Image (spheres, rainbow, N blue to C red):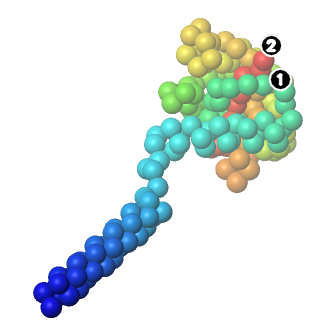
Amino acid sequence: MCFESAEMYRKAREAEEARRRKLADDLKRRDRSSAPARPRTWLSRVIQPALAVLLLSLAAEGQAAISGPALVGSVTIMQTPNTTDATFVFAGQCKGKAAMFTMTLSPYDVSGVTAANLEGLSLPGQGPAGCLSQAGGENVQVVTVVTPKFTNTNGVLVTSEVVILYVVP
């Protein structure tokens, strides 16, 4: 009788151990499959969207002679009173740093400019210092203008979102 009860306890203990091992394995499997996603780093939050904009603008424009880094910001073009000239002002960023330049467009009539025909505007010698090179002065070109952010009234054109790229020599 003693032998039978020891055998029963042994079988019950083995069954309980097997059940615990199976439960532990199931929990491990569940933990691995429901592992939390890796947190997004600054690289994925900043660089990937910028690269996407750059690639989309290149594909949309079909330009093979332009390259980065991108200048992203706002543009204001004001018609100079009593002349055929206009003043172009860019204020934005390049590589996360402030970038600005101003130039005279001659001849240039602001009144008929649309977002579509602002794209492709060449700006010779306007690459800001510290963006592509320390000296600056490279040729740049407007490649993308966000249409909903574009207004042109009374000789003043304003667009708060524009992408400008460097012209490859």
Q: Mark 2 points at which residue?
A: 169
* Disc assigned to residue 23: none
Residue 160 visible? The answer is: yes
Residue at screen point 61% across, 12% down? 133
Position of 140 compared to 24: left or right? right
Q: Residue at x 46, y 40 (%)?
A: 42
Horizontally, is 167 left or right of 158 in the view? Answer: right
Image coordinates of residue 25 in percent, x first then y, are 39, 66
Residue type, numbered disc 2 = Pro
Q: Do the residues labelled 1 and 2 touch (CB within 8 Å)?
A: no
- Picture layout, residue 83 above or below residue 2: above
Quarter of the rendering occupied by the C terminus: top right
- Can residue 80 be seen in this snapshot? no
Distance from the alpha carbon under mark 1 to that under mark 2: 8 Å
Residue 118: x, y in percent?
A: 80, 37
Q: Relative to 152, say whether 166 is above or below.
A: above
Report which residue position mark 1 lands on.
Answer: 65
Residue in the image at 70% along x and 31% along y: 164
Q: Farthest residue in the bottom direction? A: 1
Q: Residue 153 in the image: x percent, y percent?
A: 73, 47
Classify mark 2: residues with Cα within 10 Å, few (<14), some (14-19) or many (20+).
few
Displayed quadrant of residue 28: bottom left
Vertical position of residue 74 compared to residue 150: above or below: above
Which residue lies at the image location 59% right of the left edge and 8% below the top edge?
A: 135
Q: Position of residue 56 (x, y in %)?
A: 75, 42
Image quarter in which the N terminus is found: bottom left
If you read the primary sequence from the N terminus, does the residue marked by circle 1 or circle 2 appear first?
Answer: 1
Of 56 and 144, the residue lying toward us: 56
The quadrant in which residue 2 appears is bottom left
In this view, the residue in front, 19 or 144, is 19
